[in-house]
Amino acid sequence: MQSRFDPEKVTADDAIVWHENTLFLLDQRVLPQQVTFVELNNATETANAITEMVVRGAPAIGITAAYGMVLAARAAYQAGGADQWRSKIRAEVDLLRRSRPTAVNLFWAIERMEHLMRALPDESDPTERLQAEAKAIHQEDIAANRTMGDLGADLIATGSKVITHCNAGALATGGYGTALGVIRSAFKKGKLSRVYADETRPWLQGARLTAWELLQDRIPVTLLADGAAASLMRQGEVDWVVVGSDRIAANGDVANKIGTYHLIVAAKHHQLKVMVAAPTSTIDMSLPSGAEIPIEVRDGAEIESCGNKRVAADGAEVWNPVFDVTPAGMVDAIVTEKGVVHVPNEEKMRKLMIN
Ligand code: MRU
């Protein structure tokens, strides 16, 4: 695959490529130093790629799982024919479902593919129809991001300074990005005087991925250590916090990358505005509040090391939750492709989802 791509020309919008019945993922573990693709030929490899963070970001994980189900269905049909493909696919779909727990887009995409699977006629090869559905999920996500970009940019006054956390850009989605989609659109409209990005320990999605994406778009970005954000705010350097989300509960509580809550607590202390940009596939109306959102806890080795070099003292225990929850009342606007929810609560979220 690498030979088909010129690394100089690969952009963040090329992060998920479906080509000739094979899935190629831009390897986000090694960006920006290496621009390289991982080739996936079956659902087990796809689930492992999600767990190991070759691909990451809520919508991108969902899209990847949808393509993984196409790979699973093709293999199951080849092995079991029309009679058995539905039962043969089950174990691999479960593997995809267990690949990461927090981003609800994963379960949303699997459920959408399963819904189609149930509706398909028994006698036919399911591959084509499932492939078309996975491509639709991918394309709809890009369209949603462009709509959110416009809606979010409309909320931002000319001359604003924004800060973002983690990476909610093209790499984290089907393309264009959620929070970075808003930033891209606002920048195009000449509204931003500065963009700040938290480095986002321990995976450094901000330093490695957000900075890479913004610079590709010629948007100047200033990186800072996560702990520097409150001081930046006190100096009057931030008007808006703009972030994405991995799961939003029915009452508007927002789960996002660890450190988001911390950033928003500081923003509220300084009377700044907070925007969460996320497609409706990130909203989980089955969970009443953020307290029910499963928070992934990853291996402590991620904290003990920095850039593959061990930095922690031997013997210290480590706690490594990789997402946190911000209460709905601390959010000024949730921007979705269906519209903006100002100061979210359960009633407003229900109204949005019914439309
Ligand atoms: O652990 P990650 O890198 O998958 O976490 C991603 C995030 O927290 C993003 O901010 C979130 O998914 C929004 S992406 C559009």
Image (tube, helix red, strand yellow):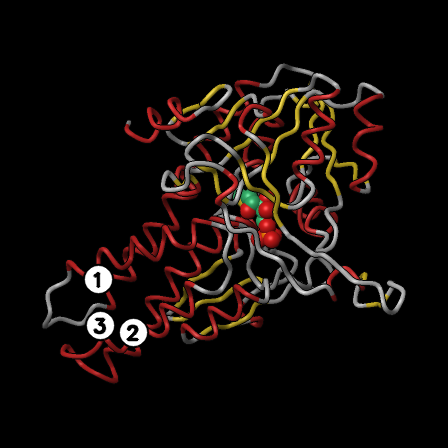
Residue 66 occupies quadrant: bottom left
In-front residue for pair 201/178: 201
Residue shown at 51% from the left, 60% from the top: 100
Residue shown at 55% from the left, 49% from the top: 172
Residue shown at 57% from the left, 25% from the top: 331
Return the disc, 2 or 1, that comes first in the chain's sequence: 2
Residue density around tag 1, few if under 14, some if 14–19, many if 20 or more, within 10 Å: some
- Residue 53's x, y, as percent? 59, 62
Dot 3 amino acid type: Arg
In-front residue for pair 149/309: 309
In-front residue for pair 146/251: 251
Question: How far apart are labels 2 and 3 at the CA level?
Answer: 5 Å
**Residue indicated by mark 2:** 89
Question: How far apart are labels 2 and 1 at the CA level?
Answer: 11 Å
Q: Is residue 79 left or right of residue 240?
A: left
Q: How many marks?
A: 3
Q: Residue furthest right?
A: 313
Question: Above or below — where is 207 with respect to 127?
Answer: above
Residue 117, label in figure: 1
Q: Secondary structure at mark 2?
A: loop
Return the disc, 1 or 3, that comes first in the chain's sequence: 3
Residue 273 occupies quadrant: top right
**Labelled pair 2, 1 in contact (Cβ < 8 Å):** yes
Dot 1 amino acid type: Met
- Residue 350's x, y, as percent? 34, 28
Residue density around tag 3, few if under 14, some if 14–19, many if 20 or more, within 10 Å: some
**Residue indicated by mark 3:** 86
The quadrant the C terminus occupies is top left
